[in-house]
Image (cartoon, rainbow, N blue to C red):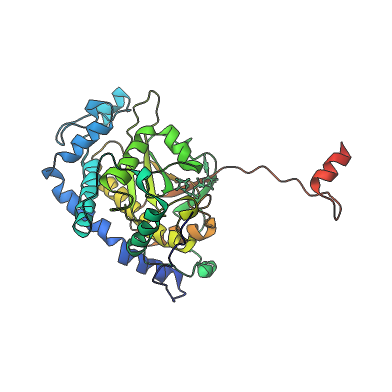
Amino acid sequence: MPSKRPQSPRTHSSTHIPTLVNNMLNSHAQVPQKRERDAASDAEQSGAPAQKATKLGENPDAATNSKSTKQTPNMPKGRAREDSVTVSPSLLSLERFLHLEKTSEDKASPKAGAKGKGKAEATDDDQHDNRTDIATKSGPGPVPWENLSSYKTTGSEDSSRLQERIGDLFAAPDDTVLVHACNTQGSWGAGIAKEFRKRYPEAFRLYEEHCLLTHHPRKNPVSTGTCLVIPPIETKRGARRHWIACLFTSAKYGGNKDSKDTILANTAPAFKHLLVQLNNHARVRSIGPAIQEVRMCQINSGLFSVKWDHTKAVLEAVLASDTGHLKVHVYSLPTAPSKPNTARKGQTTLQSFIRRH
Ligand SMILES: Nc1ncnc2c1ncn2[C@@H]1O[C@H](COP(=O)(O)OP(=O)(O)OC[C@H]2O[C@H](OP(=O)(O)O)[C@H](O)[C@@H]2O)[C@@H](O)[C@H]1O
């Protein structure tokens, strides 16, 4: 039986959304930034991340040591030489970040049981305990999102860094980052996440490892408000060279998902964390070709039940405070055009359809 979720201990009283979002970003997203900096300076010192990449990718050439020039697993051969991919500093810094995150969290909590422990162990009671833990480490707490309508970004649609398109998220060219919202439990079990799992099994394996092995869903969960960026690693023939970005906007899923306010509060730092990593990649560009496009679905708006307009306002506020230049294209599937309702008062559309035929 789902446990009653505790209320988040903190609330915001301010009504100025841009300021609120900035406060959220400043208070919550600096840790990843610092980790990124540390990661960059420490990247040369550790061979572990490259080994990990080797283990995850089926192509042993995908990552060997940080000094050699290699081809990413699904990169066409000619292209590999042309781009002269130096192995993994970006992946290294990502993995290094993950390692640092784990190390700092390990200090605060008992060491996570690694292999052999997984989501099957998380009972409802465990989940309840876990949720309480997570509430204290999540984003800065609920925000009065009903005031979001008072916040409008400046600039035309064309100059906005967040642009909405109709179409399939997955029909994206190589070197596109596909962004979606995730839980921290290692599950891509429904909605668009399930589709990601089907199309990007290697990326799923990395996400799962991040949630279940590097972290532990109960004892040492992934922090909400962070983002896992997975470089193109699919080895399947014909696979697109897509990056996958997992925004951890809710600790759990289904009936135990976070409240809408908490999901929104987590979205800002998670998205900021994504931009930090992508900007860093654009600057250092040490793992293959430049990222051409960032695409996301209308995150949080399906199974997480958050109104898209609310999430969009958060994303725009984050972009407004970001110094990078990447644009984000939000793709949504076309909806079937609705026919005008010709039914008479008191008559259902089905009834009128039956009469007509
Ligand atoms: N091909 C396509 N192109 C473009 N847009 C597409 C599309 N296919 C679907 N969409 C739309 O993409 C939006 C998000 O839709 P979703 O409901 O999946 O995601 P969400 O962000 O609300 O929630 C995340 C949790 O849902 C999952 O399932 P579990 O909770 O694990 O069971 C995960 O694991 C997470 O935890 C909706 O607007 C869909 O119409």
**Number of numbered markers:** 0
Splitting the image into 4 quarters, where does residue 141 fall?
A: bottom left
Q: Position of residue 116 (x, y in %)?
A: 28, 39
Q: Determine whether 64 is above or below 321 in the image.
A: above
Q: Residue furthest right?
A: 355
Splitting the image into 4 quarters, where does residue 84 fall?
A: top left
Q: Determine whether 154 is above or below 67 in the image.
A: below
Residue 233 visible in the shown view: yes
Q: Residue at x 30, y 41 (%)?
A: 209
Residue 284 visible in the shown view: no
Q: Quadrant of the C terminus?
A: top right
Q: Position of residue 49 (x, y in %)?
A: 20, 40
Q: Residue at x 30, y 42 (%)?
A: 117
User: Would residue 146 be found to the left or right of residue 52 on screen?
Assistant: right
User: Would residue 165 be found to the left or right of residue 113 on screen?
Assistant: right
Q: Nearer the viewer, residue 281 or 14?
A: 14
Q: Determine whether 285 is above or below 279 in the image.
A: above
Q: Position of residue 109 (x, y in %)?
A: 23, 57
Q: Residue at x 41, y 70 (%)?
A: 20
Q: Nearer the viewer, residue 21 or 323?
A: 21
Q: Residue at x 81, y 49 (%)?
A: 348
